[in-house]
Image (spheres, helix red, strand yellow):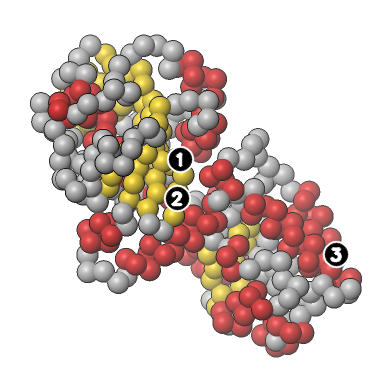
Amino acid sequence: MTWTTPFGGGVVGDLGWEKLRLGGHDYQGEAFVDFQKTLKSLKNRGVLLAIASRNEEGVALEALTRHPEMVLHPSDFAAWRINWNDKAKNIAELVAELNLGLQSVVFIDDNPVERARVREALPEVYVPEWPDDKTLFASTLLAMDCFDSAHTTAEDASRTEMYAAERERLNLQSTVSSAEEWLLSLDTQITVEELNDANRGRAAQLLNKTNQMNLSTRRLTEQELQNWLQSGHRKLWVFRVKDKFGDSGLTGILSLEVEGDVGRIVDFVLSCRVMGRNVEQAMVAFAAQHCAAVELRELQARYLETAKNKPCLRFWMASGFSFAEEGSRFSWQLNQPYEYPRGIEIRRPQDREGDSVYSKDRVTLDPKRATLPVLTN
């Protein structure tokens, strides 16, 4: 993530957007255009852009919207705080809004005083030194290796659009009377797939990057993940989530290992982008349904604590599973159906309309009556 004020040369609040030095066959104006193009290329690779600017919000957004040489527009930014508050405070608020960690932030600012303030207040944030010479902005950004990635997935490339959709969800939430009404109104659909050549790269990326909603936080390469699945008593599913505001892509993983008549959840991973929207409950219900369909007696999940996966513990403590403190083990007896959350439809890629594993119009599903021709062992 990069935080900057990429409007152009001059102070937009004093000059107005029409007089910014941006493009126009002016060496400094062209330097700002090059800098914006470099930022845009990072955004297209999945790096989130956000603004922490001392300015009037309406004036700054007007410049981004109306200036004919502007490369970046409001839709290119995942979030912004444009006001006269302390930038460190604004960054902390933006991180909370985007549900990220401070260690994910790169703060870019050409003011050494602002850089020093953020370094002091938020030591986890990476604050690189920045040149005074505007013509060096683009080359300095290109020389930074903190944005490098082995490969880019479809989910990476559309991250900014996903966060824009999240803003619309939150706006809707403020207009309804209850959290339940809001969740029902999203029309959430989850598509479940087994691990395959097409989704393995994104699944491995999610497994290795996710910290908060992650049961065991184990890290595996694509090949190690595939090797682990070679045993006949193991399964792994990925979960794609979309709703009426947009497609969040592949955002969940659940793997299962069978030992006798017990199914044990090994990986339970969910992106922070869809946390708190009942996707977690739907994933567990799907696992319980599968285990009951193959006549297992019990479903278990063992929580392995890390410094960052407390949200996962909070979910499991509220899941309805029995909890044994010794071994941090959660368990569910499969002679009882585990309830699906209302408002969510579970589908498989080959399902036709009306063939979903679980219809959002029903509150519960008896797993022993479920037919799973593809997903059973």
Q: Is residue 336 visible?
A: yes
- Amino acid under label 1? Leu
Q: Is residue 165 above or below residue 363?
A: below
The first of marks 1 and 3 along the sequence is 3
Q: Nearer the viewer, mark 3 or mark 2?
A: 2
Element under disc 2: strand
**Quick one: 56 or 327, which is closer to the camera?**
56
Label drawn at residue 135? 3
Residue at the disc numbered 2: 247
Q: Is residue 91 above or below residue 153?
A: below
Residue at the disc numbered 1: 250
Question: Image quarter for residue 12?
Answer: bottom right
In the picture, measured across the screen, residue 61 lies left or right of residue 270, that is: right
Residue 99: x %, y % from top left: 44, 54
Element under disc 3: helix
- Amino acid under label 3? Thr
